[in-house]
Image: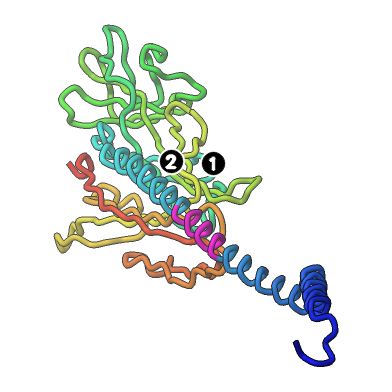
Amino acid sequence: MLSGDTNPVGSVKKRIHKEEREMKRKAESGFTLVELLVAIALGIVILAGLYQTFRTQHDSYIVQDQVAAMQQNLRAAMYMITRDLQMAGWYSNFDRSNHSIDPAGLNMNGKPLIFSTPPGTAGNIKDGTDALAIVKAGDGPRELAAGEWARGTTLSFDLSASGLNTGSRKYGLLVKNDLRTGDFFDVTQPNLSENYVAPDDMVFRADVIIYKISNDATTGQPILYRKNLGNDNGYQPVAENIDNMQVSYQILNPKTKNLEWVNTLDAKNQGQVRSVEVVLVGRTAHRQRGYTDTNTYAFPNDPDANYTPNDHYRRKTFSTIVKTRNVGL
């Protein structure tokens, strides 16, 4: 036993109680304010990183989804245009006369084959884009029956049996039975160059198919529309978010016998068309954050149509060359 320590057991108990009180005090004290602020700051940094990762992945998914939809729109639109172009001039190629058709201010003049309407044309066409019109035989054929005939400005046959009327289905085609010649006509103002007499001469309802891009009046969204004047079904949307359409024509120069590309057609060279190039530019439905489209969209056969959007949509270009198998026969 050490001298001066009269109650060693009590001293030990006191030290134990003191240590216990100190430990209890520390346990009850919790985090300091600095520690709490540091923990909150670290938590915010971690959450910010997680949110940025999520937003990046989400934006990437949205962009991929929109790009896939844009590509599908381009394919669907080009399929329909290609199908109609391949039929251009079907049973209308026999007409050697020029005609004037003015659907919605498009001012189509020439042979009933393919009409070119360049930028700046009326008809609610989006600035800087082309419109395309294609003429072909529609319903039919129906052979003229005994007693039916047509000549000059007179039609004497059953219109309804031919799928025609004086309103929404006023365009028709009359073709000689030996395919020597034909006439495109308007029921309300016929102007026939040939005399058609039964039997065997054929009458068709004519399709006049128009493709154009117009901005939607509500959303401003550029939409590719299709209308058939032959059955007057109105302008039907073919594909949404089609930003541009440019059309060029490969013609056979009758003087040089060479193939040449031109941007517009007139009454003189419509019958010389051998191929048609269609270029479509599609865009995504929505803008992408942090992206600016600074690409220049160039059209080799029509450099004047080149443009640089400088906006926040992503775009794709889709082109095809269609051989006009019925034109120039």
Q: Which mark is residue 210?
A: 2
Closest to the observer, 20 or 222: 20
Residue under label 1: 104
Closest to the observer, 282 or 177: 282
Characterize the local packing of mark 2: few (<14), some (14-19) or many (20 or more) Cα atoms within 10 angstroms: many
Q: Which residues are magenta?
A: 53-64
Position of residue 230 measured from the top left corner of the image (x, y, whole percent): 42, 29
Disc 2 residue type? Ile
Q: Secondary structure at mark 1?
A: helix
| Relative horizontal placement of residue 7, taking residue 174 as reference (left or right) | right
Position of residue 83 measured from the top left corner of the image (x, y, whole percent): 29, 39
| Relative horizontal placement of residue 218, taking residue 102 as reference (left or right) | right
Q: Are marks 2 and 1 in contact (CB under 8 Å)?
A: yes
From this view, report whether residue 191 is shown above or below residue 81.
Answer: above
Position of residue 236 measured from the top left corner of the image (x, y, whole percent): 49, 35
Cα separation, mark 2 vs mark 1, equals 10 Å
